[in-house]
Amino acid sequence: MQRYPLLIGGQWRDGLRLCPNRNPSDLGDLVGEYAEAGEEDMREAVAAARAALPRWRASTPQQRSDVLDAAGSEILARRSELGLLLAREEGKTLPEAVAEVSRAGQIFKFFAGEALRQEGDVLASVRPGVEVLVEREPVGVVGLITPWNFPIAIPAWKSAPALAFGNTVVLKPAELVPGSAWALADILKRAGLPDGVFNLVTGPGRVLGPAMLDAGIDALSFTGSVPTGRQLARECAVRGIRVQLEMGGKNPLVVADDADLAQAVECAVNGAFYSTGQRCTASSRLVVCAGVHDHFVEALAARCASLRVGHATSPDTQIGPLASEEQLRKNLDYIAIGQQEGAVLVAGGQVVETRYRGYYLQPALFAEGLSTHRIVREEIFGPVAVIQRADDYPHALALANDTEFGLAAGICTRSLSLASHFRRHAEAGMVMVNLPTAGVDYHVPFGGRKGSSFGPREQGRYAREFYTTVKTAYLAA
């Protein structure tokens, strides 16, 4: 069985111990054994990134662009191989996994271009004989803590802009899925990054997260749970660390009375259940206007029951396993809670037996959800969706906005005026019209409002707001 070490200061090295990485589709399939780091490893990784910072920040835009472009090209060339790895360790279906790898490659290609497009301003001073220059500089050593549900795309969309703008990086991926992050580190090392510019430290977040902050990073970008994100925000405030948080959602998809029913059903299926519902942008709340409610429930229940659950790499699988036993247990608990609260389970919700030992669950659909129900208010992170009945569009909009989260929101409608009204009044960072709430482009901003996000946006050109700092210089003639 192949063993995968840490990457610190350009050197592959052992950790405290090795941890197995198992396939959630088939627990008998061991993907590999990955090093578990300790606090001292994290301190050394941050120190290595600090030592490498002067050289990397002084590199030319062309040098940084060339490295990122080479990394993106290799990722794209190996998308089938890396997609299989991702499917094995996380449980996405193979087409979804290959698409995620492709997205990671495209992200590196995009930021290879951004490295060459760094901008500043030359302004006239209000004082005679003085010139004003406004420039952007790298923040410094950036810590990245990434989740298990997008094990290569999220490390890519954090590390690519960090590197493009001259920062050095310490990546701590989710303990559950170290394989894709390790492959990314290997690719970046061979793409020509100087030693210490990118460091990979795998292991438990409860140990390595605090150690990363204590080691003296300049900025932290985190994607994960709300409780962990809020704790990190408090810790970063005390230490004066710049922080960016993405913490999930409870995203509504409104189905208006005039919606194309077939289209609305497919948007709901895709948004709620694809990727086994393990997306922070998943349509976990379906807010349906009274005029189409009963027809929509009937059609979606039938579609939900027909979804084929199975091994992530099987060609006929539509829904793969949950990523872990903990996630399966959490989803089953919420299904029981929903029934106890009075919501009506109209489809799915049962464990699926296959020829493989894995974490399989038939997607669950509830109707008659109320705003007081926990399954309506709390992020479940799995293939569980609940339908809320709305009297009309204004009521549907009010229900859609009745949440502590504000990541994504969608509407299915044939009305341009309704679509425009929803776009303006939905309290979310991203709005979809006649599209699933899950599924975003790599070259535009990603992020939400309220409890979903904190700090500058991720992705696209807006990523520079987090990974750079502004310097204003005054020059006398």
Image (cartoon, rainbow, N blue to C red):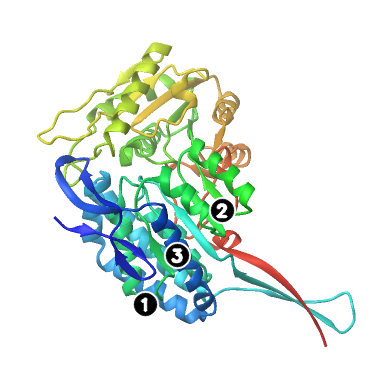
Q: Amino acid at mark 2?
A: Arg
Q: Position of residue 468 (x, y in %)?
A: 59, 65
Left or right of residue 449: residue 339: left
**Label 1 Cα neighbours within 10 Å, binned few <14 / some 14-19 / many ≥20:** some
Whether 449 is drawn above or below 40: the answer is: above
Q: Is residue 23 visible?
A: yes
**358 or 103, nearer to the observer:** 358
Residue 131 location, quadrant: bottom right
Residue carrying label 1:
192
Judged from the image, the secondary structure of the residue bearing numbered disc 1 is: loop
Whole-number angstrom distance, CA of label 1 to CA of label 3 = 14 Å
Residue carrying label 2:
457
Q: Nearer the viewer, mark 1 or mark 3?
A: 1
Judged from the image, the secondary structure of the residue bearing numbered disc 2 is: loop
Q: Is residue 413 visible?
A: no
Residue carrying label 3:
160
Asked if the residues shown at circle 2 and circle 1 are in contact, with their CB atoms under 8 angstroms apart, the answer is: no
Whole-number angstrom distance, CA of label 2 to CA of label 1 = 28 Å
Q: Residue at x 35, y 33 (%)?
A: 382
